Amino acid sequence: MDDVRPSPEEILAKIKQEEKEAKVGKLKIFLGYAAGVGKTYAMLDTAQQAKKLGMDVVVGYVEPHPRPETAALLEGLELIPTRKINYKGKTFEELDIDAVLKRRPQLVLIDELAHTNVATMRHLKRYGDVEELLAKGIHVYTTVNIQHIESLHDVVEEITGVKVRERIPDYLIDEAAQIKLVDIEPDDLIQRLKEGKIYHLEQAEKALDFFFRKQNLVALREIALRRTADTIYHHKTYESNPLVQSVHVEEHLLVGISSSPTNAKVIRTAARLAQAIHGKFTALYVQKVESNGSNEANSERLQQHIKLTEQLGGHVVIVQEDDVASALANYAQISGVTKLVIGRSAMKKKWWRSNSKISDRLNDFAPNLAIHIVPDQENEKMSFPNVKSQLKFEWMDLLKMSVVFSLTSLIGLFFFAIGVSESNIITIYILGVLVLASWTSGWMMSVINSLVAVLLFNYFFTEPRFSFEAYHRDYLMTFFIMFLSGFITSSLTRKVKKQAVAAVQKSYRMEVLLETNRKLQHAKSLEEIITEGMSQIVKLVEKPVEFFEIENKLIVKSTFFRTDSMTNIENKEIATLFDNVSERGIVTWVANNKHVAGVSTDIFPEANAYYIPFVSGDNVKGVIGIALSKESPLPAFERHILHAILNDFSFALDKWYLQKLNEEVAREAELEQMRTNLLRAVSHDLRTPLTTISGNAEILLANGIKINNTERNQLYQDIYNNSKWLVQMVENLLAVSRLDDGQLAIEMQPELVEDIIQEALLHVVRMNNTHKITYNVEPELLLALMDARLIIQVIINIIDNAVNYTPAGSEVIITAKEIGKSVHFSIMDNGPGIEDSLKARLFEPFTTGKVQRSDSGRGLGLGLALCQTILKLHGSELTVADNEPIGTIFNFKLEKGVVNIDE
Amino acid sequence: MNKRILVVEDDVAIGHLIKMTLNSQHYEYDIVKDGQSALQKVLTMTPAVIILDLGLPDMDGVDLIHKIRSWAQIPIIVLSARGEEYDKINALDAGADDYMTKPFSIEELLARIRVAFRRNTNEPNLNQEQPVFVNGDLQIDYLANTVFVSGKEVHLTPIEYKLLVVLSKHVGKVLTHNFLLKEVWQTVLQSDVPSLRVFMATLRKKIEENPANPKYIQTHIRVGYRMLRYGGDE
């Protein structure tokens, strides 16, 4: 019971330990509006003060600065050497995160939060390093300039005309423990620049004309001040009582996500607006049901936009619907959206669309919604990534075309010969074009097909026949219409075909998901769950998958799951990709940090696969590695299904672990119950012999001389017999006490069956010479896996029973036979047998049969119950059957023992 | 010859029982109740056999064995109430020759004492490294590496022979699994214990007349093996 109910001290100690582990480091950001305002100086100055207060401070990374004042502040601070990395012929200096983790300071200084790491580093961005350090409980001081904040990207670009590529997500600023704005008058900053304190004089000249113009600096300073003010509000609301917070009406801002290149700007504007009004920020992606497999570039851009939204602190929702306007309006109404943000270009009415403007339609759907229309003029070039693939030309298609058109021409000539009119022949050609459209691929083929159809018709059927000329002017019109209808028909057919393919793919994926659910529910063992879960993922992504089993944050086992969509050789190649130190290092990192990593993430982007931790309870139980490559990341839809499968998978595993725990608890309870029953039975059985012994001794002490010799001898004999019986009882008690610790106390070892039977017989024979007891072991050197003492006790109890319940002179035979992978034990007697009514209750304590032996006036009711408990702990069971022609057989099985004999 | 027995037992009733038993056989004996007086007695009375209860009031019985063994090779029979193999093995590994678990029978105790006395008489033989070992019908020629049972040569595998030699050099003493593994395999791996059992069984089949009722090699389940002097009482 002790392990079930820990003492309060233990609980307290555990809580303290957990608190210690759960401790997260705090981030302090020194924010400036431009280079040279003195962020690094301020950071180092604060760090020096912290050090004076006794903090353990180290410098993780500080930009090499020319300014002597800054360099002076570095003195006395411990520097963690940076890591020098050769990448594409250049040497880069990066923060050595592993060195910092190993050093484990209280506080680490890391300059330039927005820095992008060299591609071979663990994290793509330096803020990834910072986040990991914070998660490990190390405080971080860092610096950042205002133009690096994601949501301010467009504003800064408008002001300065500079596109900032290194950007950090807004949540870093909002969730930082402290923000220190390092401020300086723009005039002073310009003065500093002129003095060459920021850049070299030459560079400074350029900078003054460009970035460091006064109006720029004023604007940037204003933005920085505002952004800092916003974070103060953010802190206030988060620190205040959540009950109070829920009282005031919250603004909820909704923005639509699309794959359009202008969408990023709309998202950023919406995020800024959400910050300004301190509202909730949601982004909705409306996935069209009939979307005809949007191209690579588009889906990649969509992924970027989703990621951007998440970085800006937004929540992404994906719905499937055809009508974007109604989807937006519906979601807005359901979720209590107060403001909707859409880009101006989305307002443009497209000439071929019958729909009215999206804003009008939104107005119709949700008249109470405030709609913000933001400018999003396309600042990126329109691209036609599609055209090239459409122009693709295949010889097979040409062959198909000639076959189809030969046939149509022949049919046409036949109909022409029997006098069918030209218009019908045109229909036959259009039919041909239609057939080809569903048979060949590419937009170009549609054009060619239609053109060839027109030419063939012209050649064969218009006057003058068998020439490409036409006499009648009307034909020109005919040709044109024929070409047009051919082209449109084939375009439509192609579209339908694509949609059908997409629909099939989509339903296949949905089917995979449903199937996963079903299969996982039926999986019985852990292996089965893992195998089913992984093979479903393989089916979905059509890539090989490796599952790493994790125990105590270490890889204990890994299993590779191949895909049928690749050849054996390809599968093998990928399997070897998983099997190297750096990939395993990533897996360990994922297990330690409970965070996804690898391809298509910012952590270890150079890895060979995408790694997802699988967490059950609070422990990482496994890591799933999907062999994705940079060229083929997962599309949005697949990613969603994958997450759904992972959910199902983790649910199934959780269920399994819970079930295992329950089974263990039930087993414990059962064992506990057995133990209690056994102990009660033992103490009950102890009383009778003790009464005999103490009573007889009393008589002998008081009246020893008066009693005649025969009677006295009888009393002595009874004392002796009863004490021997007590000895046996004590052995059983010892066995029960060993059961006390459950399975842990059982020492399973391969034992020679013959030794065990001999030892058991030694105990029985010593007290008994009325029965004939023999044994037979086949083969001679048979080993069985057991706890020797307990099994000897089982055999003794059964033989004792046989001896006690059969008349003197009966035979008892013990046999042990090897059958398959187990050893079958039988103990049979030729006594009167056991009544069927008794058999059912035989293994319950207190059950006794009719005693045959006169000198033993009690049953061993406990014995068989104990035997049953012992055998259950061995994963076996004691059964009883009738012997032929008369008597009883007790049977049980044990696992065969294996031994290596090498001389 | 010297037939003095030192009994180290703190329980009065059991002490009395042992006293009665030894009296009936006219053995010379002395009973002490703790470890310190036991050590003194070992020095002053130089007993031929020590019967030692493991649960002593002033020190651990196994420690006492270690101390005695540091200068004397007197046979020690351990009495243990604990009934756990672990204690017995510890005591045997410390240098005890034999063990008995309470409750034990009088006959058993006397038999063990006789074995111990016999072992004592054989001691000089062992030290002189006799070239031939004779035990009933069993005969081992250490120089020729041959074994005879009733005059007929028995073919043993190298390991069987090594086992037999080790057992024969410690006749009457219970040898633990670990001891045997170290002597024969040079390494002590628990995973080798099952192989030891198998070799012991095959060895027994070759030298015993009736393996079901062995007269030379006795099995002590979970503890070890012992070679008995033929004509012993067990």
Image (tube, coloured by chain):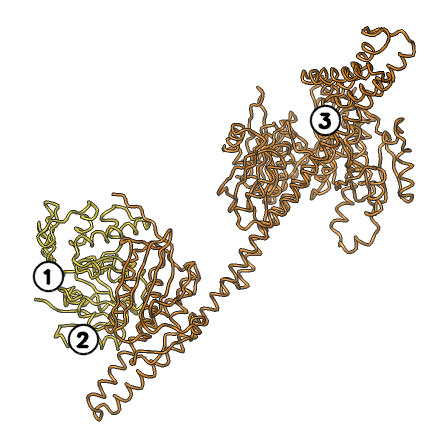
Chain colours: A orange, B yellow
Residue B230 versus residue A834 in the image, above or below: above
- How far, Cα to Cα, is label 1 from label 2? 22 Å
Residue picked out by circle 1: B121
Residue nearest the viewer, comparing B47 with A812: A812
Residue A380 is drawn in which quadrant? top right
Q: Position of residue A605 (x, y in %)?
A: 61, 31
Residue A359 versus residue A832 in the image, above or below: above
Q: Chain of mark 3?
A: A
Q: Residue furthest bottom?
A: A706
Q: Earlier in the sequence, mark 1 or mark 2?
A: 2
Residue picked out by circle 3: A297
B73 with respect to A498 (left or right): left
Q: Position of residue A176 (x, y in %)?
A: 70, 42
* Element marked by disc 2: helix
Q: Residues within 10 Å of mark 2 (few under 14, many from 20)?
A: some
Determine which of the numbered discs, if any, sits on residue A44 in the image: none
Determine which of the numbered discs, if any, sits on residue B21 in the image: 2
* Element marked by disc 3: helix
Give the residue type at disc 2.
Answer: Thr
Residue nearest the viewer, comparing B33 with A812: A812
Residue A455 versus residue B79 in the image, above or below: above
Q: Residues within 10 Å of mark 1 (few under 14, many from 20)?
A: few
Residue nearest the viewer, comparing A593 with B57: A593
- How far, Cα to Cα, is label 3 from label 2? 100 Å
Q: Do the dots labelled 1 and 2 sit on one chain?
A: yes
Q: Position of residue B110 (x, y in %)?
A: 17, 70
Give the residue type at disc 3.
Answer: Ala
